[in-house]
Image (cartoon, grey):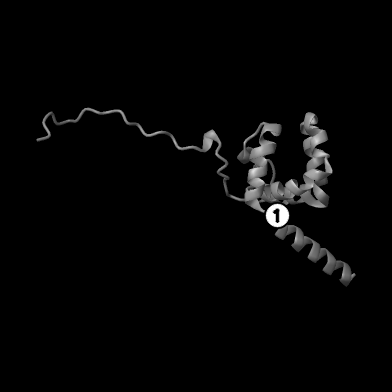
Amino acid sequence: MKKMMIIFTLFFLVTAVGADVNKGKRYYMKTFKQKFKMSGEAFAQLHTKAEWTALFADEGRGFIKEFSQKFPKQSAYLHDPKIWKKLQHVGDFAETYASDSGKTPTCGDPGVLETPLDLEIKDSSSANFF
């Protein structure tokens, strides 16, 4: 039993160290955003951190199942065994910016950009400045 716990802990640490939030954001923006038709923020806010962790456990089987049902046209892509390497990073991105994290990703979405400055010239209350 103790050996199993050590092996599980080592596996968890190796998996956690291998994932990268920034890579996950890039993979999401480059590939998954077009496939799921939602911004990075909207995607990450779908679940809590614990829910994302559960979905990406066991090589992302929960994530693949859920998103294959939501997006049937992407099922073949999601079931490709080569996708797991990207999914690890996307999972880390989703967990970091989950609905209960209090963080908002800046994925270059148009809604995140600041409003432009108003450069219109306004009349002054004084007619003569000098």
Q: Residue at x 70, y 54 (%)?
A: 19
| Residue that lies at the very extreme toward the right in this rendered image | 1
Q: Is residue 38 visible?
A: yes
Residue 105 image-quadrant placement: top right
Find residue 128 and report its horizontal and vertical position in percent.
11, 31
Report the quarter where the N terminus lies: bottom right
Q: Amino acid at mark 1?
A: Ala
Q: Residue at x 79, y 38 (%)?
A: 78
Crowdedness of circle 1 by 10 Å Cα count: few (<14), some, many (20+)?
some
| Residue that lies at the very extreme toward the left in this rendered image | 130
Asked if 41 appears above or below 21 in the picture, the reply is: above
Asked if 125 appears above or below 87 in the picture, the reply is: above
Asked if residue 47 lies left or right of residue 59, the reply is left
Q: Secondary structure at mark 1?
A: loop
Find residue 3 and report its horizontal and vertical position in percent.
88, 71
Find residue 90 and report its horizontal and vertical position in percent.
70, 46
Asked if residue 115 lies left or right of residue 129, the reply is right
Find residue 5 and report its horizontal and vertical position in percent.
84, 67
